[in-house]
Image (cartoon, grey):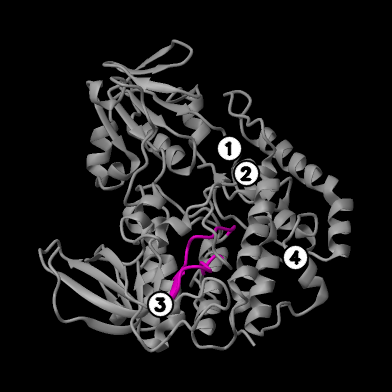
């Protein structure tokens, strides 16, 4: 790799200009950070990993920056990915953020150049802006041969866990995609097709879609819509792990937020650092968790033909919510299934044959096209740029990155991560933690010791392990308000943000509650 002798030196570098990178940029803009974005636009996965039919999973008012409401925030429809990109670009224009972003600039390597004294592995976490460069970043622009090196005192990683690097299942020898006569692609490849090319790929073809999360569901619906008419072929979803899906955010006429997103509703869930009184209350109210879960399940089974198609999960709804795995079901999905345009094949193992797919129950499925909606390798994305031993410090047996407040690794100096913690509304989650990070950078408060930070992270991981079998992601959905409270208290702000006790107990929390932190 060619290295230029002249380093571009700056205080703060941000890698990635998706939603998280944009949130971090806005809060740190007074330091004039340099933002590297590999693509030619803002938006991250909204730009690179969206289908033509992709929509937001939550209402507009739950997905907005605290100081930039949607112009039509009361519109009940879910915005399309193009509307979200317009919103993000409008936000960047409103706060003059484009001047900090270097598009078509791919980070190919990160080097630690700080001295070991910068990283105090046993005591207090050091200053985030030390006055000396700690990280060097190699950037390749527009696929050029030349590498430009930059040096920063502080680096914020916002490349996220999704997109860029597809995750593929493992197959037995001679039973992988290489023996299949048809076409195999990952959902990431499908995202890159324009509308006409995508339609031509699917039209009058026997398509198998592997997966049953949001991207697979959307893809199967697009496949069904491309195969209308007498020559249209059905799309078969190969379902390995079932998860609960919801048609909208109402349950038996009640708004969904009443069950999970208010202070009163989160009382029934365990929280880190809870007092003895809270622990006793949580124990007394624990049967309510099952009641709430069964109540929601009863509505979903009434509203959606899950049992008819063998799509009823064996685990409680609350486990999908606690692991941030709940998906919105598109309105016409089961209408297409009723027409025979979408079929389902339950299996735990599959492999390829020349004609299609084979399953562990000895059945076969003929296919022309197989699309693997099998997720992304977020760990490999980080491994591609972070040096050792720092990358290994992010590895944890349960797959959860051990980040304090979802942002700081206690053992990695002068670096932060935004967008690696999930909740009901990830934009709000990223923005509040970026507010916290900006105040930390400005020395408005001090971090606890490394030992105490690690202790806090492990408490959260243990709660997630007890809440759901799908705990291999940092999801705080069942204690998100408590998490935000602790962040506010650390910043020296009031954690109760509502105007009345009634609203504090029964109204949902969102970005607008943190517009003006005092």
Residue found at x 65% / y 36%: 303
Magenta span includes 409:
yes
First in sequence, mark 4 or 3: give its number.
Answer: 3
Query: Left or right: 123 with respect to 171?
Result: right
Check disc 1 and report its element: helix, strand or loop. Answer: loop
- Say whether marks 2 and 1 touch (CB < 8 Å): yes
- Residue 409 lies, in percent from the top left, at 51, 66
The residue singled out by tag 1 in the image is 243
Residue 197 screen position, x and y as percent = 22, 40
463 w.r.t. 34: above or below: above
Query: What residue does disc 3 label?
Result: 25
* Residue 92: image location, x then y, percent: 37, 77
> Real-space Cα distance between discs 2 and 1?
7 Å
From the image, which quarter does the N terminus lie in?
bottom left
* Residues marked 4 and 3 touching at CB (< 8 Å): no
Question: SS for tag 3?
Answer: helix
Q: CA distance from mark 4 to mark 3?
A: 31 Å
**Which is nearer the N-term, disc 2 or disc 3?**
3
Q: Residue at the spot x=12%, y=67% of the render?
A: 2
> How far separated are the C-alphas under marks 1 and 3?
35 Å
**Of 254 and 488, the residue lying toward us:** 488
**Cα–Cα gap, marks 2 and 3:** 32 Å
> What residue is shown with label 4?
273
Q: Which residues are magenta?
A: 406-424
Q: Earlier in the sequence, mark 1 or mark 4?
A: 1
Residue position marked by numbered label 2 in the rendering: 320
Task: Report x, y in % for residue 351.
Answer: 37, 21
Residue 285, label in figure: none
């Amino acid at each position: 790799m060619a290295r230029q002798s002249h380093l571009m030196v700056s205080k703060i570098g941000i890698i990635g200009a998706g939603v998280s990178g944009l949130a971090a940029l806005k809060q740190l803009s007074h330091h004039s950070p340099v933002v590297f974005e590999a693509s030619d636009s803002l938006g991250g996965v909204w730009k690179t990993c969206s289908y033509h039919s992709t929509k937001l999973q939550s209402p507009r008012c739950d997905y907005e920056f605290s100081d930039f409401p949607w112009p039509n925030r009361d519109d009940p429809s879910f915005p399309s990915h193009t509307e979200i990109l317009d919103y993000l670009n409008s936000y960047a224009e409103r706060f003059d953020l484009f001047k900090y972003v270097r598009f078509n600039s791919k980070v190919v390597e990160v080097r630690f150049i700080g001295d070991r004294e910068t990283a105090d592995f046993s005591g207090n976490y050091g200053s985030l802006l030390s006055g000396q460069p700690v990280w060097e970043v190699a950037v390749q622009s527009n696929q050029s041969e030349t590498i430009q090196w930059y040096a920063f005192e502080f680096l914020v990683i916002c490349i996220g866990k999704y997109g860029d690097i597809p995750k593929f299942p493992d197959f037995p020898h001679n039973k992988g995609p290489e023996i299949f006569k048809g076409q195999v692609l990952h959902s990431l490849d499908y995202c890159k097709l324009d509308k006409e090319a995508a339609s031509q790929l699917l039209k009058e073809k026997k398509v198998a879609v592997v997966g049953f999360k949001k991207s697979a569901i959307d893809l199967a619906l697009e496949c069904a819509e491309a195969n209308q008419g007498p020559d249209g072929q059905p799309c078969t979803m190969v379902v390995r792990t079932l998860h609960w899906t919801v048609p909208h955010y109402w349950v038996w006429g009640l708004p969904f937020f009443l069950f999970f997103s208010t202070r009163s509703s989160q009382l029934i869930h365990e929280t880190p650092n809870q007092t003895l009184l809270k622990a006793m209350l949580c124990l007394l109210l624990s049967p309510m968790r099952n009641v709430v879960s069964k109540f929601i399940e009863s509505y979903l089974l009434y509203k959606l033909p899950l049992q008819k198609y063998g799509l009823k999960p064996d685990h409680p709804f609350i486990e999908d919510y606690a692991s941030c795995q709940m998906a919105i079901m598109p309105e016409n999905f089961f209408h297409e299934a009723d027409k025979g345009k979408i079929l389902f094949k339950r299996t735990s193992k599959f492999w390829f044959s020349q004609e299609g797919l084979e399953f562990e129950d000895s059945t076969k499925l003929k296919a022309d096209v197989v699309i693997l909606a099998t997720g992304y390798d977020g760990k490999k994305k980080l491994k591609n740029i972070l040096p050792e031993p720092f990358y290994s410090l992010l590895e944890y047996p349960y797959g959860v990155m051990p980040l304090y407040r979802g942002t700081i690794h206690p053992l990695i100096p002068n670096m932060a991560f935004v967008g690696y913690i999930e909740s009901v509304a990830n934009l709000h989650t990223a923005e509040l933690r970026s507010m916290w990070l900006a105040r930390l950078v400005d020395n408005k408060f001090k971090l606890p010791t490394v030992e105490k930070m690690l202790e806090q992270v492990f408490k959260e991981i243990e709660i997630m392990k007890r809440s759901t079998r799908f705990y291999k992601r940092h999801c705080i959905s069942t204690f998100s308000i408590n998490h935000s409270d602790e962040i506010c208290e650390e910043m020296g702000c009031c954690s109760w943000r509502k105007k009345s006790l009634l609203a504090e107990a029964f109204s949902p929390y969102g970005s607008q509650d943190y517009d003006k932190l005092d």
